[in-house]
Image (tube, rainbow, N blue to C red):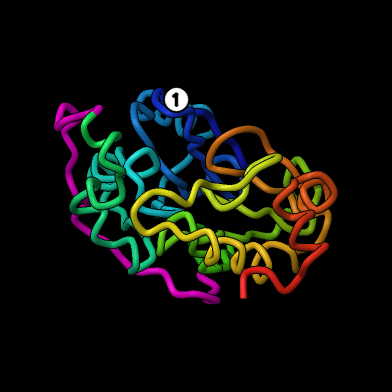
Amino acid sequence: MLVTGFPAEAFDTNCYVVAAGPGEQCLIIDPGVGVLDQLDEVLEQHRLFPAAVLLTHGHFDHTFSVAPVCGARGVTAYVHPADREMLANPALGLGASVEQLFGGRLTYTEPDDVAELTDGATMTLAGLEITVDHAPGHTGGSVLFRVPGARSEWDADQICLSGDVLFAGSIGRTDLPGGSTETMLTSLRDKILPLADDTVVLPGHGPATTIGRERASNPYLRELVAAPGRGL
């Protein structure tokens, strides 16, 4: 299995490309700001053909290029219904200071073909089985995407594309519209902690990690392990 990624031009948002192998159909996860040239290079290098775009949540640093990516290739964008409105109006997910910072200078368009993600569903796309876990807290519609990883470079049983739910050493912020600290703690307890220690985590920002490493060193997970009732 081929899994590769690169940071976007803004916010260091990770854009990932996942495929069964070179020369196959692929999935694009979280095409953010200024990723089009890099994405085209990755697709050409590995002879890949996009089958769909998957969005871990609706913040524009993860969705900014979704319309041109989908429109150029006639593919569907998948997002959780709780974040669907942000694809039409990214300002709904921004704090006032962030919205004022950009002030309409970035031109954004909504993709034509959008499908909704369902918690617990396993989808077959591009020859891969992707399990969707709704994990709100950063946004109301944040999700995890889990794919088998035994044939990848990590040779792990599972890969988790965690968006802005879990990072190496930290978690996603909860102070933007739609965020909730208690809801985030519940998602970490119910959706992250049950994953196997060797699960490879590919986050929305920063380096890859594993569940075992985060369980042992991430202060937010350590607190939940020590006090499992938090987040109820």
Residue 117 magenta-drawn?
Answer: yes
Residue shown at the point (41%, 54%) measured from the top left? 57
> In the image, which residues are magenta?
101-123
Q: Position of residue 106 (x, y in %)?
A: 19, 30
Of the 4 image quadrants, the one containing the C terminus is: bottom right
In the figure, is residue 164 to the left or right of 51? Answer: right
Residue shown at the point (39%, 26%) measured from the top left? 10
Residue shown at the point (78%, 66%) measured from the top left? 227
In the figure, is residue 92 to the left or right of 47? Answer: left
Q: Position of residue 14 (x, y in %)?
A: 51, 36
Front one among 115 and 224? 224
Front one among 63 and 228? 228
User: Residue 54's quadrant in the figure?
Assistant: bottom left
Amino acid at pointer 1: Glu
- Residue 150 appearing in the image: no
Q: Position of residue 114 (x, y in %)?
A: 27, 62
Q: Is residue 76 above or below residue 9?
A: below
Q: Callout 1: few (<14), some (14-19), or many (20+) C-alpha neighbours within 10 Å? A: few
Q: Is residue 73 above or below residue 196?
A: above
Residue under numbered circle 1: 41
Residue 1 magenta-drawn?
Answer: no
Q: Position of residue 153 (x, y in %)?
A: 75, 40
Residue shown at the point (51%, 70%) measured from the top left? 123
